[in-house]
Image (spheres, helix red, strand yellow):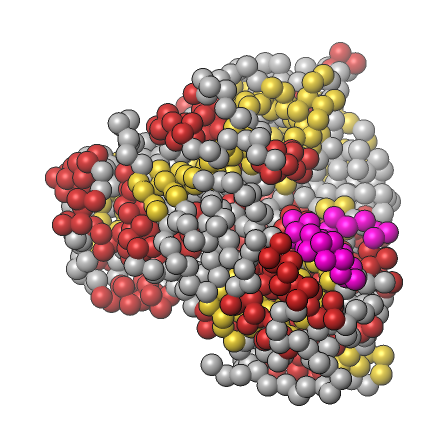
């Protein structure tokens, strides 16, 4: 690993050891200073940027702040010394509390301030006038502060920056965004030391490279966990379903576990599942245990109430989604239950880590698969954890749509030349390899929108104030930019108002806009732990009344779904191919596998299993590729394209990590497979087909928002996603027609290729398995196919298939009867 | 008027459909236009010219090709049916200043369309309480032809001497059909014994669900819907 070398300024004398004041504070707390905490202090003194990787409960956050506290205790100062970046707003509040403790205990002359989207205008002003010594901030708020003209004054003396939970967002667009902010900070304060805090990750070097500047990765300080978590599969007497993703069958067992443990966290994968499990737990709750629910759609007040109750130990269990995954320290959780597939090893470890915050004792966790297929995934995850294998996002080259935003952000602070900003961008590690030509097109887009859009005044965003030096074209441009900083493109949300009478009631949370829009008055759905009856949408609010029904009519809303990790798909395939390992699986699951073997086949490694069967009025074809979501997604687009050509009338396809499922009107036969699962489908007009797909429009939507083509906020009110969608879809079509080489179309394609497609892997697969398939024509869905065909997320194809369905639904009798009369009318017209 | 063979071909291709309404026969066209063979007449509704340029005044950076595109679509329909008369059922212009934003070419194209037929009627709507003189053709709050009232928003028929039914625009009805776990969505015609709701024809027009209270309160009788989907037209049944 390369050392980061920077020149020491002579005036700085930093302590390399823990001073007495601090060591006695540790003693008072009956803690011992851990070796890596000492190393962090030394690293700061020697100005070595460092990534600390440690399991939860290791005092990671304190390790990050310790050098700062010691330095400030020794050399009190005014102004900003350390910036702490957290991906979660809620985390900054929590950290603020925890940080204030040692400062108060030791009476240190240190000021701390937090700044997030929730900070009041007054506080913001104060923070800019008199910055605190330590500023706790989200990446978006940091970027916003960097856009002000006084940024050099505020940030000029910053000595350290701490990036918390770095693993959770480094290799996403938000990570690219943060890396750019770091590069900007470094240019304002060249002697800045970067600290990263992270849970255990698969590729520490990649994360260290991300945290450092281009070509100068940080050092890695890894703390090994001494104990491995104890993870078990649920043993149940209940009948486990073949399909379904809710895990309702296990509610009795889950309740029994809650009743015996002190405090339990029940993690689920979607908000709908959280609502359902919560509802059923209360039906079981004969002992009236305090059980709460927590997910991102609930109102802030409701969540804070739950957090406070949890912190004071008043709850026995919380049913939660990923909203509770990061950071916040709950103290006394002694059991974590994961309901549904774990989705990925690292995610599972993160969740399990929420229990038992003492690093020397093992965490306890129980996995509850929602169906028999998921048992395989749970077992694969347990195996991987035993072997110490980890998955996780892989580094990628920086997303290009972030750059126009960054360019604008820089010139909002100070007028600048293109080359100046290009050099800074190169310093940010995800953009180290960015070529000047691409940057120039992005610059031009930022300047005037590019060829097709430059006629629009609003896209003239930069103006040349002296040769080569650019500034925002107007105050309005600056204002609009500041309102729209960030990379998180939210699915539109509508607030839910629980009506008591007329239109009066309390806001209890938010649902996705598209979910609300499919509701018809009278529909019922689970929300915030009860069944609500939809009344209508008024003033951007969903109005609903408590419903009398026990079971809602609309079973779920999709909120907060997570993709599975490709890594686990490999684990499942391996497990399937080693029958001797099946003994570890519950009896019910073994029976299910035997059933699959008898009814169809167990997918093998040398042939692709293809199953065909009718299901709920249409025909299904399943390809078990085990090649991951992206490859399956690409395959789905290409195969349906080919099917449309062959007149097989495809309707839609859906993907899992294991395979691809296509629904069609016509029956796919064995003779069709060589033409469908064939390398030459790659030669079809993939580009055209892809560019017209709804999927690409969705990608473009995100790119359009992030790059500033269109704004989510206008006059400080948020636009509905429907408005945004309406506009971006039209712009997308216009650009395709009039300016097909537009930089944003290129960015969209790249985005899609990175996030949705895997041509390379698909190509390899198609060649490897060319002609090597095992086709099974079945009377109904095989046991293994059930969870896949029950999955509702599908890409619909607007083609012959959908038309055929409508024809079935259509009534033509009446029209036929009228034909003669109309014919008569027409002939009369002609005679006149 | 369209020839018999051409109409037959359209019926087979499902780009047109016949209905019986208020004792008259009509052709519904998959473009969203309505055709009345008896009077050699084509009907468009809710064109919303210049909606794109209207919205782009409010931070919606929309391409401004919508008016031109709507005109092209109208040209295609008129070429196919070659009518003597045209009615536009209101909200032809998106707002009072639409004309000032319209480019000259679009304006002259609209006037060419008007000149191409014997009579062109603009029904006034809530978005366009008057049609500027620069646009040819005659305008009125409503027209009564035979026993049918042609109007933008629904009227109380007792006020009219001869009308027993009305054809209206304004609501932009849309519909979603669920079949075999798939959902097909599009604009639609809605008809009862004495009301026919036209889909919006304009390029940038959105829609209101047929199930919406505003539409349902109009439809006391059983109603029939025809869905526009993928440039085709489907009769999607009768609901009580």
Q: Going by the image, does A31 lie left or right of B125?
A: left
- In the image, residue A387 above or below residue A793: below
Q: Residue A561: give x, y in percent of width and height.
A: 48, 44
The part of the chain drawn in magenta is: A94-123
Q: Residue A682: give x, y in percent of width and height.
A: 34, 65
Q: Quadrant of residue A522?
A: top right
Q: Residue A720: give x, y in percent of width and height.
A: 67, 44
Nearer to me, A468 or A6? A6
Q: Residue at x 77, y 43 (%)?
A: B94
Nearer to me, A606 or A21? A21
| Residue B40 appears anywhere in the view | no
Q: Residue at x 63, y 51 (%)?
A: A91
Residue A103 among those drawn in magenta: yes
Nearer to me, B234 or A495? A495
Residue A475 among those drawn in magenta: no
For the image, the number of numbered tags is: 0
Q: Residue at x 65, y 63 (%)?
A: A22
Q: Going by the image, does A712 lie left or right of A434?
A: right
Q: Residue A261: give x, y in percent of width and height.
A: 43, 33
Nearer to me, A368 or A658? A368
Q: Residue at x 80, y 81 (%)?
A: A469
């Amino acid at each position: 690993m390369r050392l980061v070398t920077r020149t020491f300024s002579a005036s700085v004398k930093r302590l390399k050891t823990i001073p007495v004041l601090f060591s006695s504070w540790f003693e008072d707390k009956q803690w011992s200073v851990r070796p890596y905490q000492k190393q962090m202090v030394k690293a700061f003194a020697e100005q070595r940027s460092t990534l600390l990787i440690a399991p939860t409960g290791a005092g990671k956050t304190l390790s990050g702040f310790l050098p700062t506290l010691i330095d400030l205790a020794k050399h009190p100062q005014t102004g900003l010394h350390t910036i702490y970046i957290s991906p979660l707003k809620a985390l900054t509040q929590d950290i603020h509390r925890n940080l204030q403790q040692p400062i108060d205990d030791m009476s240190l002359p240190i000021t701390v301030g937090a700044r997030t989207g929730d900070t009041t205008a007054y506080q913001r002003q104060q923070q800019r006038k008199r910055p605190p010594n330590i500023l706790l901030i989200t990446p978006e708020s940091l970027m916003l502060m960097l856009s002000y003209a006084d940024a050099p004054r505020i940030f000029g003396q910053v000595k350290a920056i701490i990036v918390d939970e770095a693993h959770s967002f480094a290799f996403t667009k938000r990570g690219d965004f943060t890396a750019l902010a770091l590069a900007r900070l470094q240019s304002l304060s060249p002697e800045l030391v970067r600290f990263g805090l992270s849970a255990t990750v698969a590729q520490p070097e990649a994360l260290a490279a991300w945290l450092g500047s281009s070509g100068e990765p940080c050092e890695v300080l890894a703390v090994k966990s001494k104990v491995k978590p104890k993870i078990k599969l649920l043993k149940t007497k209940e009948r486990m379903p073949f399909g379904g993703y809710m895990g309702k069958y296990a509610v009795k067992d889950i309740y029994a576990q809650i009743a015996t443990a002190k405090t339990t966290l029940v993690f689920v994968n979607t908000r709908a599942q959280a609502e359902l499990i919560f509802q059923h737990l209360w039906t079981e709750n004969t002992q009236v245990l305090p059980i709460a629910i927590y997910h991102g759609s609930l109102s802030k007040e409701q969540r804070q109430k739950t957090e406070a109750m949890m912190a004071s130990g008043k709850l026995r269990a919380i049913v939660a989604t990923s909203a509770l995954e990061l950071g916040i320290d709950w103290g006394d959780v002694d059991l974590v239950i994961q309901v549904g597939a774990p989705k990925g090893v690292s995610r599972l470890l993160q969740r399990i880590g929420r229990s038992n915050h003492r690093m020397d004792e093992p965490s306890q966790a129980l996995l509850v698969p929602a169906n028999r297929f998921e048992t395989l995934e749970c077992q694969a995850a347990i195996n991987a954890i035993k072997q110490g294998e980890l998955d996780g996002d892989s580094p990628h080259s920086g997303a290009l749509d972030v750059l126009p935003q960054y360019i604008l952000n820089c010139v909002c602070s100070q007028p600048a030349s293109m080359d100046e900003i290009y050099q800074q961008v190169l310093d940010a590690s995800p953009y180290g390899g960015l070529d000047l030509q691409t940057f120039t097109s992005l610059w031009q887009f930022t300047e005037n929108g590019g060829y097709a859009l430059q006629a629009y005044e609003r896209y003239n965003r930069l103006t040349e104030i002296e040769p080569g030096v650019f500034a925002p074209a107007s105050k309005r441009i600056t204002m609009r930019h500041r309102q729209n900083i960030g990379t998180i493109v939210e699915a539109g949300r509508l607030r839910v108002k629980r009506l008591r009478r007329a239109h009066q009631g309390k806001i209890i949370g938010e649902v996705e806009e598209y979910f609300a829009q499919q509701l018809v008055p009278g529909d019922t759905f689970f929300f915030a732990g009860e069944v609500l009856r939809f009344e209508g949408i008024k003033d951007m609010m969903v109005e609903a009344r408590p419903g009398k029904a026990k079971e809602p009519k609309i079973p779920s809303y999709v909120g907060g779904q997570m993709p599975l990790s490709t890594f686990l798909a490999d684990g499942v395939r391996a497990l399937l191919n080693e029958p001797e390992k099946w003994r570890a699986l519950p009896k019910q699951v073994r029976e299910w596998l035997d059933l699959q073997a008898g009814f169809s086949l167990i997918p093998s490694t040398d042939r692709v299993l293809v199953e065909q069967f009718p299901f709920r009025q249409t025909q299904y074809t399943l390809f078990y590729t085990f090649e991951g979501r992206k490859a399956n997604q690409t395959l789905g687009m290409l195969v349906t394209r080919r099917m449309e050509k062959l007149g097989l009338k495809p309707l839609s396809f859906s993907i899992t990590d294991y395979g691809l499922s296509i629904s069609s009107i016509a029956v796919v036969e064995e003779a069709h497979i060589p033409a469908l699962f064939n390398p030459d489908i790659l030669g079809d007009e993939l580009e055209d087909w892809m560019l017209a797909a709804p999927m690409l429009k969705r990608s473009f939507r995100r790119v359009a928002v992030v790059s500033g083509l269109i704004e989510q906020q206008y006059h400080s009110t948020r636009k509905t996603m429907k408005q945004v969608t309406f506009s971006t879809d039209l712009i997308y079509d216009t650009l395709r027609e009039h300016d097909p080489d537009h930089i944003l179309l290129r960015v969209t394609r790249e985005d899609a290729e990175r996030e949705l497609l895997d041509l390379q892997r698909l190509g390899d697969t198609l060649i490897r398995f060319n002609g090597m398939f095992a086709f099974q024509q079945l009377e109904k869905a095989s046991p293994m196919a059930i969870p896949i065909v029950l999955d509702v997320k599908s890409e619909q194809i607007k083609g012959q298939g959908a038309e055929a369905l409508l024809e079935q639904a259509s009534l033509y009798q009446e029209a036929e009867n009228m034909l003669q009369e109309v014919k008569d009318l027409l002939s009369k017209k002609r005679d006149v | 008027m369209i020839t018999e063979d051409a109409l037959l071909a359209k019926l087979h291709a499902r780009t047109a459909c016949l209905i019986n309404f208020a004792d008259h026969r009509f052709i519904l066209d998959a473009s969203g236009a309505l055709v009345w063979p008896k009077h050699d007449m084509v009907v468009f509704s809710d064109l919303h010219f210049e909606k794109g340029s209207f919205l782009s005044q409010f931070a919606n950076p929309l391409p401004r090709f919508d008016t031109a595109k709507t005109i092209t679509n109208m040209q295609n329909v008129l070429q196919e049916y070659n009518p003597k008369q045209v009615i536009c059922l209101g909200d032809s212009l998106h707002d009072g200043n639409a004309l000032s934003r319209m480019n000259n070419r679009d304006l002259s194209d609209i006037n060419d369309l008007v000149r191409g037929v014997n009579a062109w009627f603009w029904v006034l709507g809530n978005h366009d309480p008057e049609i500027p003189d620069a646009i040819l053709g005659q305008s009125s709050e409503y027209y009564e032809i035979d026993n049918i009232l042609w109007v933008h928003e629904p009227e109380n028929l007792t006020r009219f001497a001869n009308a027993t039914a009305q054809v209206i625009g304004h609501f932009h009805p849309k519909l979603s059909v669920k079949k075999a776990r798939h959902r097909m969505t599009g604009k639609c015609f809605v008809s009862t014994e004495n009301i026919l709701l036209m889909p919006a024809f304009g390029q940038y027009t959105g829609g209101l669900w047929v199930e919406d209270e505003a539409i349902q309160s109009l439809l006391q009788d059983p109603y029939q819907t025809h869905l526009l989907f993928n440039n085709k037209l489907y009769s999607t049944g009768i609901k009580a």
